[in-house]
Amino acid sequence: MNQLIIDDAVERVRAALETGRVDDAISYLNTLHPADRAETFADLETEDQHELLPRMDAESTAEILEELEDEDALAATTHLSSAQLADVLDEMEPDAAADILGDLSPERAASALAEMEEADDVRPLLAYEDDTAGGLMTPEFFALRESMTSQSAIAFLRAREPDAETPYYLYVVDIQDRLVGVLGLRSLIMSSPGVLVSDVMERDIRTVQAGTDQEEVANLMTKYSLLALPVVDADGKLVGVVRSSDIAHVIEEEATEDIHRLSNISSDGGDLGPWSPVRTSVQRRLPWLYINLFTAFLAAWVVSQFEATIAQLAVLAVFQSIVAGQGGNAGTQTLAIMVRGLALGEIEIRDIGPALLREIGIGLVHGVAVGIAVGIGAFLWKGIPFLGVVIGLAMIGNMVAAGMAGTLVPLTLKSLKLDPALASAVLVTTVTDCVGFGLFLGLATAFLPLLKPV
């Protein structure tokens, strides 16, 4: 549903509420897809949400809360009494209910848990951080015994009546509940009735522990095209399953976090969007501007060492920013490739040598190609033949420095157990600015007598 249709849905709900037709507004909302219903609800004024939510049934409310962003879902719960909230949480997937309970105040969370009927399914999940496999997993899964026959396993599933959203992975555990295999539903159905589950199951299983970071979980499921990923404890016991639907938002969240950090925006406190409060935007962006200001002073100090040279040939001031700017662009390209490679597991710390040599080679090629173009342009513009040579050499050197910095900085931060996207952009830009200014003005100083118009 595009934004125009969402806007129309919002207007229809508002019109019904303005004339006191709350039940009509709810009936219309229930005709929408849960995702569209949640988006329409989120676009309503707080007063309208407060009027609607307490009068909606628990199932519809649960579907809305599951689709809303965490902050919006938390705000929506303020419209519900503890008893209503408990009913809604009972209708939600355990992992989604745990996410909301984890965001509530301790008192309100305890009150809701006390009134929930399915509290035992949710309570264990509260022990895990939201951004871990334990925080993402659901305890609702089907585990077969390896001693079962195909016939008894099928009877077991029929008795449990799996819903349509259940992935068709069946996990096999031993008598101590340790995960020993996985079985596809199709393989089970095609097996002879008397065949043991242990004879048809796959023993090569991808698993994660409950404390595994969500980004690693998402990467693993994406790499191996898994619809579900089992979560085990330190003893190998199956404690939950992360479904593919649970990691869709993780991929978006991690990508957003990396973009913010590459752009020198603090990632603390949730997503920062175009309509975030001005105060929040300033708080999270201003500190990095101060850091950039410090690095700008460092680059300015490098330039200040060549004031006498610039005073003798003012045209140098025109071209110094070209050398530094092109180096910064090249460094950003390398940085983006390296950060993405680290995030996807395509490059490891042990690859630093080959990666560095490769980027140095690419930097040389880029430097020669761009340096020649800039050198020719400088000669045609200012008529100083050797100026083009100086710019070309400085460009080559800065491109190589950009490739080295774009490779070394994120890999070094990763080796120090720091997020490679956190400060990489600031450090790489500092290197390319300082090296670019220093090389260009240093070469110009060395060859100043040759920098004369023809």
Image (spheres, helix red, strand yellow):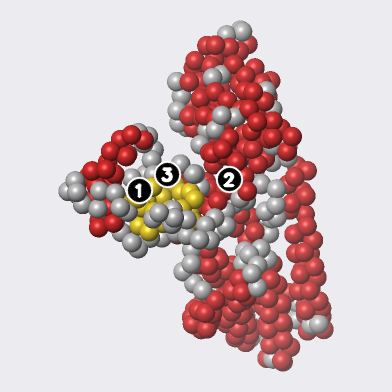
- In this rendering, the answer to whether 408 lies above or below 211 is below
Location of residue 404 in the rendering, given as x and y in whole percent from the top left corner: 59, 79
Disc 1 from disc 2: Cα separation: 22 Å
Q: What's the mark number on residue 25?
A: none
Q: What residue is rendered at 50% in x and 20% in y? A: 29
Q: Which residue is mark 2?
A: 125
Please indicate, yes or no, whether residue 364 appears anywhere in the rendered image: no
Q: What residue is rendered at 54% in x and 41% in y? A: 95
> What amino acid does circle 3 point to?
Phe
Tell which residue pokes out farthest to the left in this image. 192
SS label for mark 2 = helix
Residue 289 falls in which quadrant of the image? bottom right
On-image quarter of the C terminus: bottom right
Q: Which residue is mark 1?
A: 144
Specify few, some or many for label 3: CA neighbours under 10 Å numbering under 14, 14-19, or 20 or more: some
Location of residue 205 in the rendering, given as x and y in whole percent from the top left corner: 38, 60
Q: What's the mark number on residue 141?
A: 3
Location of residue 88 in the rendering, given as x and y in whole percent from the top left corner: 57, 27
| Left or right: 319, with 172 as reference point | right
Disc 3 from disc 1: Cα separation: 10 Å
Specify few, some or many for label 1: CA neighbours under 10 Å numbering under 14, 14-19, or 20 or more: many
> What amino acid does circle 2 point to?
Leu
Q: Are marks 3 and 1 in contact (CB under 8 Å)?
A: no
Q: What residue is rendered at 55% in x and 66% in y? A: 339
